[in-house]
Image (spheres, grey):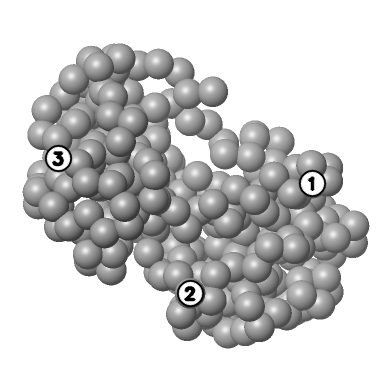
Amino acid sequence: MVEKLQQIWVDGELVPWDDAQVHLLTHSFHYGLGAFEGIRCYKRADGKSSIFRLREHIDRLFDTCKMVLLQPKFTREQIMRACADTLKANGLEEGYLRPVVFLGEGAMGIYAPNNPVRATVIAWKWGAYLGDEALKSGIRCKISSFARHHVNVSLAKAKMMGQYTNSVLAKREAKFGGYDEAILLDPTGYVSEGSGENIFLVKKGKLITPDLSSSILEGITRDTVITLAREMGLTVQEGRVTRDQLWLADEVFFTGTAAEITPVREIDNRPVGDGVVGPITKKLQTKFFDVVRGSDASHPEWLSPL
């Protein structure tokens, strides 16, 4: 449950938490047209706080707006500043940020070209998305009966509201079945991603992940892991992945802003490798957390100090 804080940024100003409300006729509430991001701020080893890859997240937010034909009233720089201001206003040294651009109230029906385009930034405290134990020991997953959207049915590269209904259904199905997370295939039967994460597997020391022409979100943590892996001397292959490749993988893990790097220890009641977190996953986890939270200063361009 999200802990109530003090203030939320709404359309250019910080307002009290309880006053940050929208009308029930808000268009995005009914039809799901809207863009959002998930961003983390970490307190690092030197005691200073930095927002991780803020520019890339806001660029993707505006890319989604372009794809769904929403024109924000604010610039990228204004939204970036709003993210920092919202963290400071709530006294957060670490936290999760949710910028949202959505269509406000006015006309109803599918086509509402003159409704106001609104923007908000919410911050809250959020630990490990799937739990601390998941980061240490890995999770159990199920191949979902729900497929990821076809690239001509929805916008796979957009992080937009309504698209996540599919993910909610897949996640609920997995949880009701006693699993921690779902893995979705694409409409042709190849591995796509989790309900809210990109996916990697390790086979014979090689890192493999679905490529960007697949029906996947272009994850920023995904890009981070690929960059770090190559710097560590690992071979990274992007391409199609089959379900049985996951079953026979030596290691599997999820990546995402919320999930960070979460190992997968079991898929469809089959242990991944030896059923424990593998050595390459551990190395990448360690490197990632040292970059975002530790003393590793190898990528200052990824850090936006508060």
- Give the quadrant of residue 29: top left
Residue 147 falls left or right of residue 46: right
Image coordinates of residue 112 in percent, x first then y, are 22, 54
Q: Depth check: give the residue in front, 92 or 99.
A: 99
Q: In the drawing, what numbered circle is on residue 153? A: 2
Image: 72 above or below 146: above
Q: In the drawing, what numbered circle is on residue 158? A: none
Which residue is pictured at 46% across the width and 80% down the height?
A: 152
Q: In the drawing, what numbered circle is on residue 81? A: 3
Residue 69 falls left or right of residue 171: left
Other-residue count near label 1 (Cα within 10 Å), few / some / many at <14 / 14–19 / ≥20: some
Q: Which-is-in-front pick, marks 1 and 3?
A: 1
Q: Are marks 1 and 3 in contact (CB under 8 Å)?
A: no
Image coordinates of residue 33 in percent, x first then y, are 34, 54
Q: Amino acid at mark 3?
A: Arg
Q: Secondary structure at mark 1?
A: loop
Quadrant that contains the N terminus: top right
Residue 9 falls left or right of residue 167: left
Of the two numbered discs 3 and 2 on the same chain, state the one appearing first in sequence: 3
Q: Secondary structure at mark 2?
A: loop
Quadrant that contains the C terminus: top left
Q: Which residue is mark 1?
A: 179
Cα–Cα gap, marks 2 and 1: 28 Å
Other-residue count near label 2 (Cα within 10 Å), few / some / many at <14 / 14–19 / ≥20: few
- Give the quadrant of residue 248: bottom right
Image coordinates of residue 81 in percent, x first then y, are 14, 40
Q: Amino acid at mark 1?
A: Tyr
Q: Which-is-in-front pick, marks 3 and 2?
A: 2
Q: Secondary structure at mark 3?
A: helix
Q: Amino acid at mark 2?
A: Val
